[in-house]
Image (cartoon, rainbow, N blue to C red):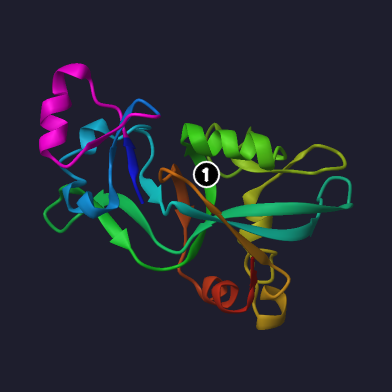
Amino acid sequence: MSLLLNVPAAEETEAKSKGALWDANLQTWYLPDINYDHIMEVDKWITDRDTAIILSDEVIIAHAQHTCPHCRNTTPVIAIGSDFFYEKDMNERDELVWFELDFFTLFQQTSVISAHLFNFFRDNYPLYKQGPAKSADGFYWCNHCEHCGKDIDDATLFAEPGSVFNPDNATAATAITLRTFPFKYAPHIDADYNMNENVRLINEFAGRT
């Protein structure tokens, strides 16, 4: 999974010494996956500085059906997922570092996404867009009903056991489909996630395409 970098011209030599490479086609610098051990050394050049999660370059989109709380019609809903990812957090010495987390999860309360992920949703899932956050400040990315157009709060999809993305048994998890989309460069997001039993059920019993 290669990582896009925003390297000023005056710092290109330094970036190259830390493992960054130049993509001549896209005219941009990037960190190849073989050099991810240098990720903290190139941290200052990582694009989308407000994001704390780097997804795999094979992004998972979870698909399900949900009854809209506004119009009561059935509408498709999605969630962002990943089989592994990096998260920026404090270590035991109170230093900000990137941790590699090797497990499947779905993300919720997504407040920021990188530009190429924005373009992906615009082109493929136009009903997944920014809406007012009911359980957080400002706006976040959420589903919108295909019938009435109103936003569907992530809390209704994730919070309670038995919710569409919080299945409490294997049968409920089979109603979810996971589709994988390859990206040339790993997208970034800022979002919440959990490691509860529902995530294990989805990973084990949801269909994958």
The residue lying at 52 percent from left, 76 percent from top is 200
Circle 1 is placed at which residue position? 110
The picture quadrant where one finds residue 120 is: top right
**Secondary-structure class at tag 1:** strand
Residue range in magenta is: 5-25
Q: Nearer the viewer, residue 8 or 85?
A: 8
In this image, 16 relative to 156: left or right?
left
In this rendering, the answer to whether 39 lies above or below 116 is below
x, y percent for residue 71: 89, 46
Identified by mark 1, the residue type is Thr
x, y percent for residue 185: 41, 43
- Could you tell me if residue 140 is visible in this image? no
x, y percent for residue 99: 26, 57
**Quadrant placement of the C terminus:** bottom right
In this rendering, the answer to whether 200 lies above or below 65 is below
Answer whether residue 14 is magenta in the image. yes
Answer whether residue 200 is magenta in the image. no
